[in-house]
Amino acid sequence: MKFTVYIIFSITKNNFYVGYTSDILEERVRKHNTNHKGFTGGIGDWELKYSEIYSTKEEAIRREKQIKNWKSKRMIEKLIQSIPT
């Protein structure tokens, strides 16, 4: 089983959301775009911007917390821009 840390962005909220999943990533993003309660619910324009794959849940949670602890939109944008094209 693999675990994915991901970052999605909403133009409407002008905000990033950082999470992790063991599901298929595309399915998880689709769920974020459904009408549900919570931070990502009811918006519908979340787009995947970044992802990293880990072999253990513990590693994924550690990385998710690290990114969330940055509390810096600029650092998240810098991480996203580091993706090789």
Image: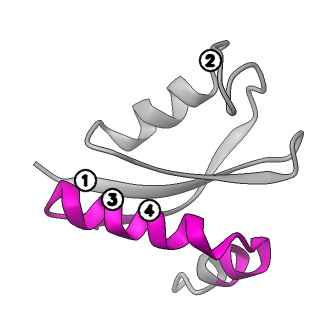
Q: Residue furthest front?
A: 69
Which amino acid, by three-letter code, is at mark 2?
Answer: Thr
Residue 50 is situated, as x and y percent measured from the top left of the image, at: 53, 64
- Badge 1 or badge 2: first in the primary sequence: 1
Q: Secondary structure at mark 4?
A: helix
- Check the image and report above or below for 72 versus 84: above
Q: Where does the magenta region start and end?
A: 52-78
Q: Which mark is residue 64?
A: 4
Q: Nearer the viewer, mark 2 or mark 3?
A: 3
* Dominant SS type (magenta): helix
64, above or below 25, in the image: below
Given contact means CB atoms under 8 Å apart, are the residues at marks 4 and 3 in contact? yes
Amino acid type of the residue tagged 1 in the rendering: Phe
- Give 58 or 2, whichever is nearer the viewer: 58
The spot of residue 39 in percent (x, y) is 69, 33
Tag nearer the camera, 1 or 4: 4
Q: Sequence-wise, which precedes: disc 1 or disc 4?
A: 1
Verify whether residue 4 appears in magenta. no
The tag earlier along the polypeptide, 2 or 3, is 2
Quickly name the residue at label 1.
Answer: 3
Label pair 4/2, CB-CB below 8 angstroms: no
Q: What whole-number distance in Å separates the C-alpha atoms at marks 2 and 3?
A: 24 Å
- Left of 51 or right of it: where is 16? right
The residue under label 2 is 34
Dot 1 falls on a residue whose secondary structure is strand
Q: Quadrant of residue 51?
A: bottom left
User: Residues under labels 4 and 2: Cα distance?
Assistant: 22 Å
Residue drawn at (86%, 46%) of the image:
11
Helix, strand or loop at label 3? It is helix
First in sequence, mark 3 or 1: give its number. 1
Residue 17 tag number: none
